[in-house]
Amino acid sequence: MLWFKRRRQLPETEKIVPKHIGIIMDGNGRWAKKRGLPRQAGHVTGAKVFRTIAKHCEKRGIAVATFYTFSTENWKRPPEEVDAIMNLLREYLKESLADFKKENIRTRFIGDRSVLAEDIQQLMAQAEEATKNKTGMILNIAINYGGRAELAIAARQIAEQVKAGTLSPEEVNEALLEQHLYTAGQPEVDLILRPSGEYRLSNFLIWQCAYAEYVFDDILWPDFSTKDLDKVLEIYAGRHRRFGGV
Ligand code: IPE
Ligand code: IPE
Ligand code: MG
């Protein structure tokens, strides 16, 4: 009876849109292999799908979308593949500097960019600068991102403040730690989407996902469409989140 009441009280599904969605763009390599193509071909199509889906997230009224593009662990891949991914990033940044004008999207990059090629770092800074006054969705692009590395950096920054005497250990709490994350000030993640039939987080947004809903899908990322995202958002809207309450 109680269950029934609670379900009835849910607002109409289309109104419940996640404030923050995290998308693990996975399955590019398998998509290419299935077609007898080199893995890089999967990344090329995957990058196109990323552009389409990012725009669709904005259209659907999502406030923040974080796309997992390259993890701190992806350096283990063959150098040709890493180079191909970095070249795609470079191309995307160059092309989108023109595209940004048309969109109302704020682009940000999360992860340790200091080890990336100098020109890529410059393009990233330009993209952030060019879109900083936009009022629409925040698009976080995670590059050389790892959730553990993010937490370690936050811990180090806090430790330095304590050492300098500007912060006391008693002041260290969840809110303070949150301020030291790449996503400081952004809403926590409501929904994580991972296509490609893998059911894991792979070091993505581990702090921000503490109460996220998860939707896993078998579709390989290069095949993922706006309709698929609409389906995922519908599944999310039907979820009943409790946050530890009743
Ligand atoms: C995701 O696709 C893209 C990156 C991790 C850069 P994968 O390249 O991991 O594709 P699969 O998982 O091998 O199919
Ligand atoms: C996660 O995918 C990273 C990105 C999508 C950028 P991986 O393909 O690297 O993850 P694992 O190795 O399957 O866990
Ligand atoms: Mg993968």
Image (tube, grey):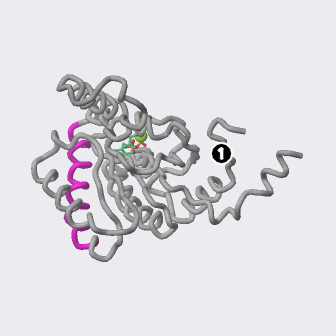
Please determine whether, in this image, residue 156 is positioned above or below residue 24: above
Towards the viewer: 80 or 218? 218
Residue 227 screen position, x and y as percent: 56, 65
Please determine whether, in this image, residue 123 is positioned above or below residue 99: above
Q: Is residue 37 left or right of residue 15?
A: left
Q: What are the residue bounds of the magenta stretch?
A: 79-99
In the image, farthest residue toward the bottom: 102
Specify few, some or many for label 1: CA neighbours under 10 Å numbering under 14, 14-19, or 20 or more. Answer: some
Residue visible at 32% across and 32% down in the picture = 73
Quadrant of the rendered image containing residue 203: top left
Residue 229 screen position, x and y as percent: 54, 60
Helix, strand or loop under label 1: loop
Towards the viewer: 133 or 213? 133
Residue 231 screen position, x and y as percent: 61, 59
Main SS class of the magenta portion in the image: helix
Magenta-colored stretch includes residue 14? no
In the image, farthest residue toward the right: 1
Examine the rendering and report whether any part of residue 192 can be seen.
yes
Residue visible at 25% across and 27% down in the picture = 156
Q: Is residue 139 left or right of residue 82?
A: right
The residue to which callout 1 is attached is 241
Q: Is mark 1 within 8 Å of ligand 2?
A: no
Examine the rendering and report whether any part of residue 195 can be seen.
no
Residue visible at 36% across and 62% down in the picture = 48
Q: Is residue 40 left or right of residue 186?
A: left
